[in-house]
Structure formats: C-alpha cells, structure tokens
Amino acid sequence: MGRKRGFKRKKDAVDWAAEHVTVALASDTYVDPAKGKALISDLYQSWYAEHSPLWKQSWRHTVEISWNTHVKDAWGDVRIMDMERASVQQWVSALSKKRSASTVLKAYGILRSIVQDAVKDRILVRDPLKGVVLPRKPKRKAKRVYLTVGQLIRFADECRKAQEKGEERRALILLLGFCGLRWGEAAALQVSDVDYESHRVIVRRNVVAIGSDRVEGTPKSGEMRTVPLPSIVEQALMHVCLGKGETEHVFLDPSGRTIRPQSVGNLAHNRTWYVSALKRLNYSPASMPSPHDLRHTAASIAVHAGANVKALQRMLGHTSAAMTLDVYADLFDSDLDDVARMIDSAVAIEVPTDSNAESATLEKVSE
C-alpha cells in the first residue's frame, strides 16, 4: 500500500498524512485527490444540469452549440487535475485565429465556469486558468445607419406595396423605427399589448430563432416595459389589429407563423419584401438600414426630439442609463454644442451689447 502511494515505509505515509491531510482538514482546505481525476466532459454534464434551468432556452441552445463545436473535442477527455494555464492559452490563441472574439469568449466562458465550480466544490485546490489572456471584442462596430423621419415614413409606405401583408409590413416598420422594439419583441406582440387609451405598447414577450424553430420567451432584459406610441404608429396598428382576437399576434407571415427575421445580406439574390422595398427606393448596399438599424433610428429620432437618457433607457429596455450612453454616445455628441449655445444665450441676455457694455457689467459687479 505504502509503495503504491510512493512511500517506502508506512511511517512515512502516516507522517505525510499528518502534515498535509490533517492540517488541510483542520484549515478547511482539504481537496480529495480522487475527485481531480474527473473528466471535464463529466463535469460539464453536471454543470449544465445545475445551471441550465436558470437560463433562457436560447442561451441553453447557444451553450450546447459552443460546447459541442469548440470545447468538447479539445477538453472533454482531459482530467480536471491535468488542466494547465499554458494549454488553455494555446487553445484560446489557436481558436482566436479562426473565430471571432465573441465565439472564443463564449467557448472559454463555459470552461471557465466549470473550473470555477470545481474550485468551489473542492475538486481543485486552485484555479488553473488564472492569467489566461483573452481576445477583446472590437469596441466600435460598423457605422450605424440612422434614417430621418421622412426616410422612415417613405420606407414604411414602400413596404405597403408588398405582394402580401402590405399594411402589416408598413405598421411593422413604423413600430420598429419610431418605438425601438427589437425584431423579436415585435414578432411576439399580441393585440392586447397595444393600449390605445394610454398610447403605449406593452413589451411582454420576445421571439428568438433556435435552429429552425421560433420560440417565444421573455424580453432580452427579462422585464416587461411600456413604450410610448406616436399617433402615426398607433393608427397603423389599429388598422392591422382590427378584427383580430386579443391573444392573436399583430404581425404574421403569410403562412400564419410569427414573422421571419429579415436581413440586408446576400443582396444579389435577396428578394424579400424588406430588401425589395429598399431597392425600389434606390438605397445602396452601404446605406441600407438593417432591421436593427431601425431600433437605432428610433433612438436617434427620440434624442433629437428632446428625450433624455433615462427616457431613452426605458423606451429601449436597457438595463441602465450607462448602457444607453455607451451604445448611443454619438447621438449625444451634439449636446456639447447645445450647452455652448445655451451659455452664449444666457450671457447675451445678461451682458448689454452697446458700447458701454464693459462699464455696465463692472457697475453690476460693484453693486
């Protein structure tokens, strides 16, 4: 027994245990060596079973895809005790050469969470991932497309010419461009969610694509919110909701399913109602607003109409005003110029403009 453990004498084994195991037990830092032999794939299954009930279905699907595609083959058969920082760094660096930073961070995040749980559960005595350098997501994305009010209305009116569901298409574009709903939130909108008395839309649900399915869940923030409803949008919604039941969806595909997400990609072969309307309006590929750009358009219109950061945060469903400022900092750049103009106006009121302005100002100060 002693020799199997590396000890020539039983006394050596007893002494070692007294020095290490007993002290570790007393200090509550003992880690069972046998548990360290667990394979990461087995720990993943336990980790997933424990955490996944708290996730949205869309995130469960994302984790499963990331694990099976990027993590399982590299780490599934590795014992947790054999994991080293250098090996993980090599994996992260190699993956970063082939995949986006976002993809790498998702894959690493799974491994990281498994390791963190292993440390908490006394399977590991220390975190072997400490010091791993990760890729950074690019701060600035491609320049956003902001439509003016006139451009938005013309786009909506052009969508009315679609072969099917023309009035619904128009109402959808107006809703996205003036109210800032996400596509999935608009897809999940029911007739009862439109409150004509308070001139509000209540965002309760969100539709996400999971594989080939479209699944309805809670909004991205997890919280219901109310969004102000301009008259032009309200009238368009009233028209398309007429005759529908309270629990029916406002927008549907001709097949009767919830509306499919639209894209401005693959323009050479894209003949969807969304892109077709933009092409008829002679938008160039670079200037075509994506569906998410309509959410940005709503933010831009609201800011230029005088909305403050907190109002914009509530309208868009951001978790904090800081997030709103971070996302739409460019929309508030003109506020600095407005501050200067307001100060100049205030000074002009207080300071006379005639030739005796300086002396008059000094007299006021002396008084």
Image (spheres, grey):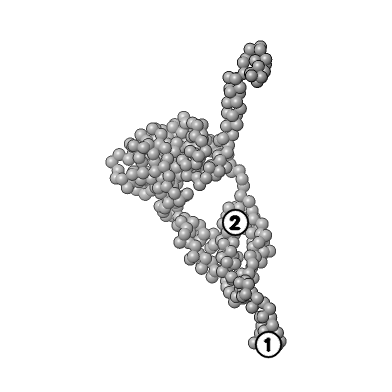
- Label ID, residue 146: none
| Residue extending furthest toward the front | 367
Secondary structure found at label 1 = helix
| Of callouts 2 and 1, the N-terminal one | 1
Secondary structure found at label 2 = helix
Image coords of residue 365 (percent x, y): 65, 20
> What number of labels is visible?
2
Image coords of residue 352 (percent x, y): 62, 15
Give the vertical position of 341 relative to 237 (above or below): above
Image coords of residue 367 (percent x, y): 64, 19
Image coords of residue 53 (percent x, y): 45, 61
| Residue extending furthest toward the top | 355
The residue that mark 2 highlights is 104
- Kindly indicate whether the residue at mark 1 contacts the one at mark 2 (C-beta within 8 angstroms): no
Marks 2, 1: nearer the viewer: 1
Could you tell me the amino acid type at mark 2?
Val
Q: Residue at x 70, y 84 (%)?
A: 12
Q: Nearer the viewer, residue 335 or 260?
A: 335
> Is there any visible trace of residue 53 in the rendered image?
yes
Q: State which quarter of the image contains the N terminus.
A: bottom right
Residue 72: quarter of image = bottom right
Q: Which class describes the residues within 10 Å of circle 1: few (<14), some (14-19), or many (20+)?
A: few
Could you tell me the amino acid type at mark 1?
Lys
The residue that mark 1 highlights is 10
Q: Residue at x 64, y 55 (%)?
A: 134
> Is there any visible trace of residue 297 in the rendered image?
no
